[in-house]
Amino acid sequence: MIITQLQVKNFRCFEQKTLDFSAPITLIKGKNGSGKTSILEALYYACYLRSFRTHNARDIIALGSQEFFIRARIGANALTPQEHDLRIGNAGDKKLVKFDGQTITSFKKLMDHYRVVALFEDDLALVKDGPEVRRIFVDQALLLLDPDTLALFREFRHILDNRNALLKKYQGRSLSDMTSYRVWTLQLWNRSLEMIQARKELLAIFERKVNELLSHFAQELTIELTYSAKYELDKEDFTLFERRMDALLATELRFGRSMFGAHLDDIMITFTNKNTRTFVSRGQQKLVVMVLKLALLEQLTQKRGKTLFILDDFMTDFDEQRVETLVNLLAGLDTQLIFTSPIYHEILERVLKGSGADLQTL
């Protein structure tokens, strides 16, 4: 799949804007406030049906308007030999999505035709912030690679919510409904085990891929991805886990929430034997995030076909050699790339020009 055209109306700073994409690589230049990031936000929204900048769709609607509109034309390729038309309208809390004229209600239905991997400055949270950000990254990767994983995630959330509601109800006192507690505990254990196994399998693939990518920069650079679980559920059976249930229950009743499960786990990222959160430079942190996203992009492209990769002014800390290496790696993935850059980023513009990129200015 490739995006051939994007139209937006009443979206952020744009009353109306149309962009055509005629090359595999596009660089969108513009001053701060010109709307570069908003263009990428629209491309992202058209895939995930949500923004990466806000949870409130009203924030996206242009000032003075009541709704916004996005239209994406998706070009033909070997897997989808016809052009497709994706239209999204949003008026406050009401959303209407049509793909080739048919109404759809979930981004899962778009996955066969339109996939996006995004890289933004905020993605540094992957290495700088807490466990939740890394869990979300891995789970989103699993979902992109296999949309059917959505059923597992929804079931896990349903079980966790019900188990937490039970614990909250009896918080600070004795639990009289042990039957429900044991039923929800077994279900949470089973679904957590499935999620842990899926995450670990993906991390093993990613670790190999990111180290292959790093070898293009320097042989001595390495990344290690380690799954860190509060309870190693995949190393014991439920019978052994159940023996500790009394002590677990006492702790859970004190806090009023589930104190085990895949929702509490973390992924430790080590860069050349250093913890990425505290012992590496900003440039190294950016390189780690970049190769993690590239690993996802490469895996997704191989498994599901061409994928759009959007990068919002992310390479300002890289020197020309590193920029050139990254662009060459990206160009070799046979996918569509859309970069944004401030007017003054001469290095990126020069490298992209050499790769045949289409340059557009807002």
Image: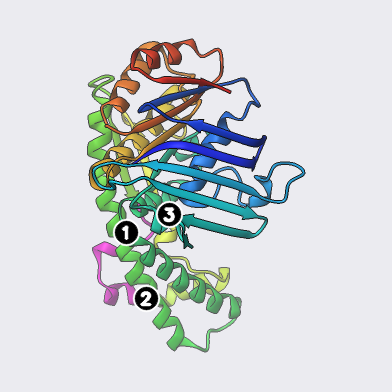
Residue that label 3 marks: 100
Q: Nearer the viewer, residue 149 or 264?
A: 149
Question: Which one is nearer the viewer's eye here, 244 or 333?
Answer: 333
Q: Quadrant of the C terminus?
A: top right
Q: Is residue 346 left or right of residue 66?
A: left
Callout 2, which amino acid? Gln
Mark nearest the camera among 1 and 3 is: 3
| Residue 19 percent across, percent down from the top left | 51, 31
Is residue 161 within the magenta segment? no
* Label 2 or label 1, whichever comes before in sequence order: 2
| Three-letter amino acid code of the residue under disc 3 | Asp
Measuring 36% from the left and 77% from the top, which residue is drawn there? 186
Residue 97, above or below 217: below
Residue 174, image x and y in percent? Answer: 55, 84
**Label 1 element class:** helix
Residue closest to the eye, 232 or 92: 92
Give the alpha-carbon distance from disc 2 to disc 1, as whole Å: 14 Å
Disc 3 is placed on an element classified as loop
* Residue stretch rendered in magenta on the structure: 228-244
Q: Is residue 146 above or below residue 220?
A: below
Q: Which residue is mark 1?
A: 196
Q: Which residue is mark 2?
A: 187
Q: Earlier in the sequence, mark 2 or mark 3?
A: 3
